[in-house]
Image (tube, rainbow, N blue to C red):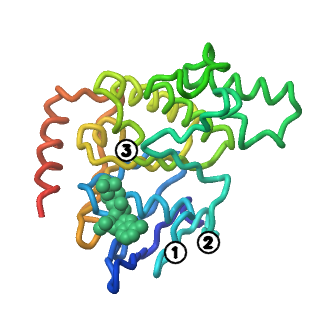
Amino acid sequence: MANFLEIKNITKYYNVGAGQVLALENIHFEVSSGELVCLLGPSGCGKTTLLKIIAGLEKQASGQILLNGNVVDATGPERGMIFQEPRLFPWLTLEENVAFGIKGRYEKKLLQTVVQKLLEIVGLSNFSKAWPSQLSGGMAQRAAIARSLAADPLILLLDEPFTALDTQTRTKLQNDFLNLWQSTHKTCIHVTHDIDEALILGQRIIVMHPSPGRIKEIIPIPFPYPRCPDDPDFITLKKELRDSFLP
Ligand SMILES: Nc1ncnc2c1ncn2[C@@H]1O[C@H](COP(=O)(O)OP(=O)(O)OP(=O)(O)O)[C@@H](O)[C@H]1O
């Protein structure tokens, strides 16, 4: 039987001036259904590029993305992307933002129920009539997650969604995200350059290196959730990962 998501020998160049940058070199790994994988690496190692290729927003030079054995070469509702900045439509209320991509799917009353349920899942049920400008950074990112969940994707692709938040909000959203993942069983690929975040969230951590972007190692994380940064095993693995960041 085919694996759920296969990233097969992906190579990607960008044209820069008269030359080319090799952004990704022969990236190869598989992701199981329901798995939470963190892509960890320093700036410029190609994390966003890889996520965009999986989302169908960028084209690779060679290699393939397979989902349930089928080639992925364009965007599709079974893959939802969440960016570092929430990208909400400022002229729509929160409920309208969440409803935007699914309006045609349900009749009005049912749409309201679905949107309300999604806002509840991300803890924003009291803010359905609020405008994006009235939300804090953490609330806006929750709203972006709700909007992404609206299409009921199989896979969530998260590009450093908590990076712009203060430490306290970030910790809260990491915990809430773990609860959401555990209750929805979505497959998640979560990009981060933060070792702690990768260790708090990932069932596996895929460590990437830059110039050219490549996989250095893939590390299964054996600790149960919730994970505690003060735990001696956590600290040991964090040190190993820090060393692994070095060229
Ligand atoms: N549109 C583009 N045109 C040219 N080069 C690009 C483009 N996008 C990315 N690159 C280059 O490709 C490489 C990988 O970039 P990418 O943004 O994927 O890395 P990243 O690991 O996500 O970095 P960061 O953590 O800073 O977002 C870098 O060398 C970058 O300069």
| Residue 28 appears in the picture as rendered | no
> What residue does disc 2 label?
71
The residue closer to the viewer here, 123 or 5, is: 123
Mark identifier at residue 64: 1
The residue closer to the viewer here, 116 or 197, is: 116
Disc 3 residue type (three-letter): Gln
Q: Do the residues labelled 1 and 2 touch (CB within 8 Å)?
A: yes
Residue at 62% in and 37% down: 147
Which quarter of the rendered picture does the C terminus lie within? bottom left
Disc 1 residue type (three-letter): Gln
Mark 2 or 3 closer to N-term?
Answer: 2
Residue at 55% in and 25% down: 122
In this view, the residue farthest toward the right is: 107
Distance in Å between CA atoms under marks 1 and 2: 7 Å
Disc 2 residue type (three-letter): Val
Image position, residue 44 (x, y; %): 28, 61
Mark 1 or 2 closer to N-term?
Answer: 1
Image position, residue 23 (x, y; %): 34, 72
In which quadrant of the rendered view does residue 42 lie?
Answer: bottom left
> What residue does disc 3 label?
203
Residue at 51% in and 23% down: 135
